[in-house]
Image: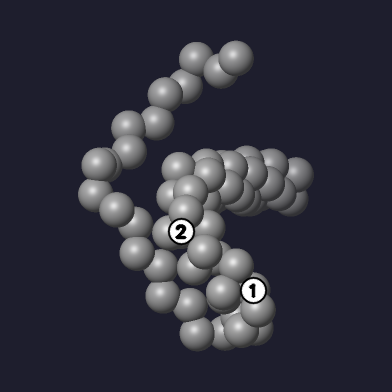
């Protein structure tokens, strides 16, 4: 288990997406309505991995 703790605001996250296929947008809309905690966890996971990848990528270019 990680020692890092993320402080997330209690404010709801509102996503506006215009370039997604309609079926994917519908699935995200359903997830946002039915299980917003799950959607938040997916976003945190994705953003964290993107940051790690970008950091490693910059380090390897040196």
Residue picked out by circle 1: 24
User: Does residue 61 appear anywhere in the picture?
Assistant: yes
Which of the pair 62/15 is nearer the observer?
A: 15
Furthest residue in direction right, as rendered = 60
Q: Which residue shows up at 57% across the image and 47% down it?
A: 42
Residue 28 percent location from the top left of the image: 55, 65
Q: Is residue 10 left or right of residue 36?
A: left
Residue picked out by circle 2: 32
Residue 59 percent location from the top left of the image: 68, 42
Element type where label 2 sits in the image:
helix
Q: Is residue 2 left or right of residue 32?
A: right
User: Does residue 51 appear anywhere in the picture?
Assistant: no
Q: Which residue shows up at 44% across the image and 50% down it?
A: 36
On screen, residue 50 above or below 3: below
On screen, residue 50 above or below 16: above
Q: Which circle marks residue 37 in the picture? A: none
Q: Is residue 13 left or right of residue 40?
A: left
Q: Which residue shows up at 43% across the image and 59% down it?
A: 33
On screen, residue 4 above or below 56: above
How crowded pointer 1 is (Cα within 10 Å; few <14, some 14-19, many 20+) is rated as: few
Q: Is residue 43 left or right of residue 7?
A: right
Furthest residue in direction front, as rendered = 34
How crowded pointer 2 is (Cα within 10 Å; few <14, some 14-19, many 20+) is rated as: some
Which of the pair 7/41 is nearer the observer?
A: 41
Residue 13 percent location from the top left of the image: 34, 57
């Amino acid at each position: 288990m990680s020692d890092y703790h993320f402080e997330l605001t209690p404010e709801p996250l509102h996503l506006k997406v215009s370039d997604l296929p309609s079926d994917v947008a519908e699935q995200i809309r359903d997830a946002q309505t039915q299980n917003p905690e799950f959607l938040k966890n997916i976003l945190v996971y994705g953003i964290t991995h993107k940051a790690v990848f970008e950091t490693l990528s910059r380090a390897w270019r040196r």
